[in-house]
Structures are given as C-alpha cells and as structure tokens.
C-alpha cells in the first residue's frame, strides 16, 4: 500500500484547468509527461487526449453540399469538480475534496480499491493501480505546486494550450464554457474547467 502524503493547500481559492482546444494539436506531450512523472504503467493515464470527429456534407437545398466535417482533440484529466460524485460514493472517505484549493485526492491510507469512484466519475478520472489494488488519479501535481512549480501538463504543452489557476480568474479571462462535444454535461458535477472550443466543438452546433 502507498503511504498517503498530504500537503498544505496551495491556494485559498478553488483551482481549475483551462484548455484551449483550438490550439491543441493532439501531440500528446501532456499525456506522456504525466505518465512519466507519475510512473504510470501501460493503460493507466491521468491525462488523456480524446480525438473527436463527426459531421458530414449537408445538402444546401440548391443542388450542392456544405462541408460540415469536424475533427479536433481534447486534453482532459480530473477536473476537481465543484460537486465531485466520486467523493459522494466513496464508502471510506478516501476520495475527498480538500478545503481551500479544492483539489480532489485519494487518501491511500483509507482506499480499499472498491472502484465506486471510477464507476461514478463521468470523466473516467479515478483509475485502479494494479500494483497496490487502490484507486489513483490526477492530484493536480500538488507536490510540484507545493514547490512553486507548475503542473507537469501545463509546463510541457508546447503550444501553451493548458493553463491552471484559481477557476474564478480563468473564467474571468477565458469565459465559462466547459460543455463541448465529446464531454458529459457539466451540470452533472460542475467541473472546474474552462475550454476554448475548437471549430465544430460547441455543443448544439450543426
């Protein structure tokens, strides 16, 4: 079993991620860096790159067609939600939301590996560590933040498409969109996530 290491809150406000999907090239540098930093085996990924595509050619009604094809990538990890279902359904309180910075963490001193958190999370964030039999997930690189550094995904992205900070500041600067094609409805857990959508990514677009 892992020994749980706690850290003092790194912020007095809820932290969140900003993803500029319009800039993301799908290079997976963030995903690889996260796996390397957390020493994750094949198949376990705390940050994941989703490839979303669809659409087609829509008749114009005048004998022609309009191109409505879309394809883009989304870089998604745990969103440290405002109302995390994983914490509600955890029977041992191992999955918990910290006061202050609002980071959702797994207390491995309490986790029994039941998997209820993984079944509950609409984003697939909690994942089983086969070596320990306990759940694991993105912890917002709290160890790096405690040392005054950025989360590894933020520091690694070559296009600057991932940012982090107090979610109120991110929303003031980038808007409050977190509902895009390929993601569950934000009303389920109220993720602390802001996304600049790629063309065609807006929910409800035709």
Image (cartoon, rainbow, N blue to C red):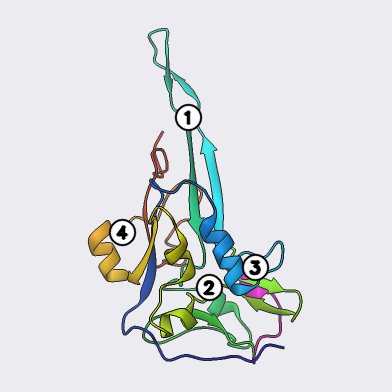
Q: For the point 55% across and 64% down, which residue is it?
A: 33
Q: Check if mark 1's residue and mark 4's residue have beta carbons within 8 Å.
A: no
Q: Nearer the viewer, mark 3 or mark 1?
A: 1
SS assignment for the magenta stretch, majority = loop
Residue toward you, 84 or 197:
197
The residue beneath circle 4 is 176
Is residue 113 covered in magenta? yes
Residue 119 badge: 3
State how far apart marks 2 and 1 are (Cα). Answer: 34 Å
The residue beneath circle 2 is 85
Q: Earlier in the sequence, mark 3 or mark 1?
A: 1
Q: Is residue 122 visible?
A: no
Residue 40 badge: none
Q: Check if mark 3's residue and mark 1's residue have beta carbons within 8 Å.
A: no
On screen, 206 above or below 192?
A: above
Work out which quarter of the rendered image holds the N terminus and state it.
bottom right
State how far apart marks 2 and 4 are (Cα). Answer: 21 Å
């Amino acid at each position: 079993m892992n020994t749980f290491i706690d850290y003092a809150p790194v912020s007095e406000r809820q932290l969140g991620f900003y993803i500029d999907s319009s800039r993301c090239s799908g290079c997976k540098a963030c995903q690889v860096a996260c796996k390397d930093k957390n020493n994750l085996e094949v198949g376990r990924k705390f940050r994941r790159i989703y490839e979303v595509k669809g659409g087609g050619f829509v008749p114009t009604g005048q004998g022609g067609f309009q191109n409505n094809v879309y394809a883009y990538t989304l870089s998604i990890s745990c969103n440290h939600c405002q109302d995390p279902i994983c914490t509600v359904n955890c029977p041992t309180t191992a999955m918990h939301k910290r006061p202050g910075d609002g980071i959702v963490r797994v207390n491995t001193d309490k986790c029994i590996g039941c998997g209820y958190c993984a079944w509950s999370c609409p984003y697939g964030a909690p994942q089983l560590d086969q070596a320990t039999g306990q759940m694991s997930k993105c912890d917002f690189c709290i160890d790096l933040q405690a040392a005054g550094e950025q989360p590894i995904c933020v520091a690694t992205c070559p296009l600057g498409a991932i940012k982090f900070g107090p979610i109120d500041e991110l929303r003031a600067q980038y808007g409050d969109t977190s509902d895009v094609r390929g993601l569950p409805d934000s009303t389920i857990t109220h993720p602390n996530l802001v996304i600049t959508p790629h063309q065609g990514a807006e929910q409800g677009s035709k």
